[in-house]
Amino acid sequence: MTHSNDSLQSISIQSLFQPFVSDKLTLNNRIVMAPMTRSFSPGGVPGANVAAYYRRRAEHGVGLIITEGTVINHPAATNDPNVPEFHGEEALKGWARVVKEVHDAGGKIIPQIWHVGLTWKPGDHPNPDILPVSPSGLDLNGNKVSEPLSETEIAELVQAYAQAAADAKRIGFDGVEIHGAHGYLIDQFFWENTNQRTDRYGGDMVARTTFAVEVIEAIREAVGPDFPIVLRYSQWKTTLYTAKLAETPEKLGEFLAPLAAAGVDIFHCSTRRFWEPEFEGSDLNLAGWTKKLTGKPAITVGSIGLNNEFTSFFSEGKGAEATSIDHLTARLERGEFDLVAVGRALLVDPAWAEKIREGRSDEMEPFTADALRTLE
């Protein structure tokens, strides 16, 4: 029996468009818009253009939108005055409009709440007179820039995260994502190179999760038992792609256990290439290992849709390509992970999910750096 490319294509993509159902979140399909910093919110306030940008993705069938990183109420949370804030009346009014537009288009949306920690230089705006903060006052290269955070300051940061999550629930978001990846503040507590503390916030791998655990527990208390909490984490850092928090599956299990116990519902596992195995001796990627070790749903991410052969559905010689859609969906079908986050491909093409579903691969918009200059 033979199959046409069209029928094979529909088989291949079917798993992407199956509903996702967990105890706290139900989605129409498995496609997630990954968080991507856009810096189109002057003064930290998202405007009508930002609301329209997210609505377009919902209109074209994205199952869940995760907003760009939005900064919590702390003076050192960002060094970009055009990154949206998640505090203050005007910014929250702007986010309420975003929620309404996405919901009116039939979509679901969660904000990513964020503190950049010590990833900016003293003198940067919007607050040039203050110093960046981090667990030990060390930047990603181990250089001392400021003093370690005090326990009082840490408690204030925990409450700022909790307040942002409470506001997210109040204005109608469908959950919240905590940015704990890429060398930003929470990840600086995770990583031994930047966390040299000798109190309860430092030490071995489990001890270094203490700050994140307190953030997660405070958020859970603020939003109640039924509001979904997503945690984005990564091994790699923005300046060091080869970094690893955990060198083995056993170490990764030690790291993830307290985070899962604290109240994370879904892990968003940031890798640069979804097809790369995380550890030797297994084909599982970081999301696959995370789901296996915690039993929690996992989101995979990393260069999805950017390879030229991604949409060459079962074409001659390309069916087994690690970067292709059938390779991705085969892993999804066997339950390695539950959701698929798409970044730059969705940034440049709001209709990417719809085109995938309808087999319109010849209409895909290729990503170029020019796409970053506008909010389409």
Image (cartoon, rainbow, N blue to C red):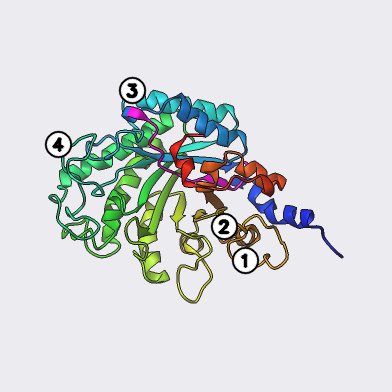
The amino acid marked with disc number 2 is Asn
CB contact under 8 Å: marks 2 and 1? yes
Count of residue discs:
4
Q: Which residue is mark 3?
A: 89
Q: Position of residue 252 (x, y in %)?
A: 39, 65
Q: Residue at x 56, y 33 (%)?
A: 56
| Alpha carbon separation for disc pair 4 and 2 | 44 Å
Q: Identify the residue under disc 4.
A: 129
Which labelled disc corresponds to residue 307?
2
Q: Dot 1: few (<14), some (14–19), or many (≥20) neighbours within 10 Å? A: some
1 or 3: tag closer to the N-terminus: 3
**Residue count near mark 2 (Cα–Cα under 10 Å), binned few <14, some 14–19, many ≥20:** some
- Numbered label attached to residue 321: 1
Mark 3–mark 4 Cα distance, whole angstroms, equals 24 Å
Which secondary structure class fits the magenta region best?
Answer: loop
Residue 347: image location, x then y, percent: 51, 42
Q: Are marks 4 and 2 in contact (CB under 8 Å)?
A: no
- Magenta span: 28-42
Q: In the picture provided, is 357 more to the left or to the right than 108? A: right
Q: Position of residue 341 (x, y in %)?
A: 52, 49
- Whole-angstrom CA distance, mark 1 to mark 3, is 49 Å
